[in-house]
Image: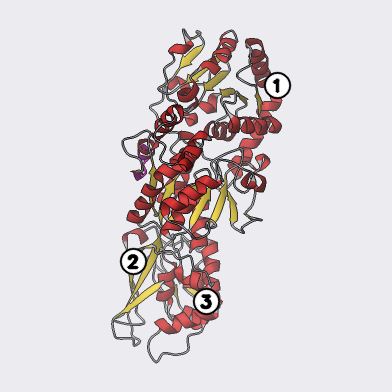
Amino acid sequence: MVDALEGADHHGGAGAPQLVDAPWQRGPARHAADPLAPLIDGSGDGERVAPDPAGRRLHDGPSPPVTNPNLGRRSTKLAASAADWFRHPRAREAATRHAPRNGPPHDARHCRRQYPAGLNAIATSSKIFSTTLSAIRGRSTGFSHSRRAGVFNSRYWPGTRLVATFSLVRMLFTALPAYGLSLPLVPLAWAARAAGHDVLFASANPMAKVLADAGLQVVDTYPDRDIWAEFAEIAEHGESFESDDVRAIIESNNSYGYVAWKTISATVEAGRDFGADLVVYASDFRSGPFVAAKLGVPALDVGNRMAWAMRDREFREKPSILNDPTLTRLLRERLDLTAAEPVPLAGIDPRAPSLGGIVDDEVDEIDGRPWWPMRSVPYNGGVLAPGWVFAPPARPRVLVTLGTTVPLLAGFSSLTVALDALSTMDVEVVLAAGNADLTELGELPENVVPTGFLPFSTVLPRCSLVVHHGGAGTIAACLAYGVPQLVLPAYGENRESADQLTRRGVALQHDPETLTVAQAQATVRRLLDEPAFAKVAGEVADEIARMPSPAAVITKLERLVG
């Protein structure tokens, strides 16, 4: 962590110690209850510590004084790490390397007491990726971090400056370019940025602009084209197949695989130009681990579904579009990869524990990666919200939505029966349909309010029920806000999600192809009138609220790669 000693005079001398602060190190005066104080100023060895008029801590015992008002914002965990560092034999080796020539023995206690500036250099930043600690613990992640430097003048080595550098990670995020599959990663990207790390999101239309509007740096990996429309066009007309393997991917309706194959090269190029140290990818984006392998950096696997996670052995091993051997071979050939698929540095499971998630960290039984729980934070954009949406409704408010994908693929026909059923009930219906054309629905009932695009975080807190298609993003938001659900599953994976929600008692479901008005009304009445549904939905929301935040996960990632 202390990268260099500048200057030639390594002899003792008098004078007050001075810290030359880098901008990110400036902050409030040090806390009296600083958990690092016993390590930094030696007070843990029995020296008497007296307050300084300027708010600093000064020794009046045998150890020399240390003046640094900006320390003290690191957690007890870093304090424990520092303690481990000084107890370890390699700490003595490090102290010897950086000590004055012909100096006294440099055991752990001597290093702590006689060269506190060196410890200051280790412990100053609250965002340390301590490569020194990594070496001591025998870990190596292969990171080539961005560097931030702080310069320290030492009173013990006059004329010498200790140059401390702090490593920040360049994180390349990537996910399938769909609202419900990319946006779950945004809060984690925000947490990384708030911690000071560099973030670049590799995506394609329609998500490139959406992610940029979320305040992230974005590179478009398929510019000026709509990759989903292209897939639909090729699948419908059976033209422009680039090879028999590509034909097999398209004919199996593996749109996820097609997007991964078409964008993987541009994603690697973006990561290389960005200087990525870590690839953060959504579990359902098959190109993620191969991008990391090509760049030669670790990867973080982030779950973005409520129905499954790669932690589930049964799901991981069953045949699916995510482990299609033809797709795997195509991706390898695209990048000229021959090595085995790398094991992610860690995996994140965002599911509530009662829906298959985890309470505490677990070790993967197949490949040994750690799995971490993480709270799902609903985000699907911002909006200039209408005032009525925040006011308590006069009657139960029911949100009706088909997300962003189903209207494009199948229109709104599956909602006709549901809207007809709700039209004669004493409820307020909010129809969130984005920019979709609603003409096929005809004249809307009087109690239906079409809103266009409306973020879940805006409307769900006042809702009593949500009628939807079973999309990943919609389910995650409903669970986080504790709202019962009526699921009209659009296709295979939606049905699996609906089954899981029904078993947990937070939802009821029905096949939209066979749903009648009478059945829809009976189901809605049950969900609104039977308190068990709202009670269980609230219990799941409480589970999610207790899970670690994205910021906590970034801190855990820092410890792992540090």
Amino acid type at image mark 3: Phe
Q: Is residue 218 magenta?
A: yes
Position of 325 with respect to 509 (left or right) is left
In this view, the residue farthest toward the bottom is 102
Which residue is label 2 attached to? 149
Position of 559 with respect to 385 (left or right) is right
Q: How many marks?
A: 3
Which residue is label 3 attached to? 86
User: For the residue labelled by badge 2, is the local secondary structure a helix, a strand or a loop?
Assistant: strand
The image position of residue 22, as x and y in percent, is 32, 63
Amino acid type at image mark 1: Glu
In-front residue for pair 557/31 = 557
Which residues lie in the magenta part? 212-219
Q: Residue at x 51, y 24 (%)?
A: 402
> Within 10 Å of the Cα at label 3, are there few (<14), some (14-19), or many (20+) other Cα atoms?
many
Q: Residue at x 51, y 74 (%)?
A: 136
Amino acid type at image mark 2: Ala
State the quadrant of the N terminus: bottom left
Q: Is residue 80 magenta?
A: no
In-front residue for pair 214/327 = 327
In this view, the residue farthest toward the front is 244
Which residue is label 1 attached to? 530
Q: Is residue 387 above or below residue 189?
A: above
> Within 10 Å of the Cα at label 1, are there few (<14), some (14-19), or many (20+) other Cα atoms?
few
Position of 204 with respect to 509 (left or right) is left
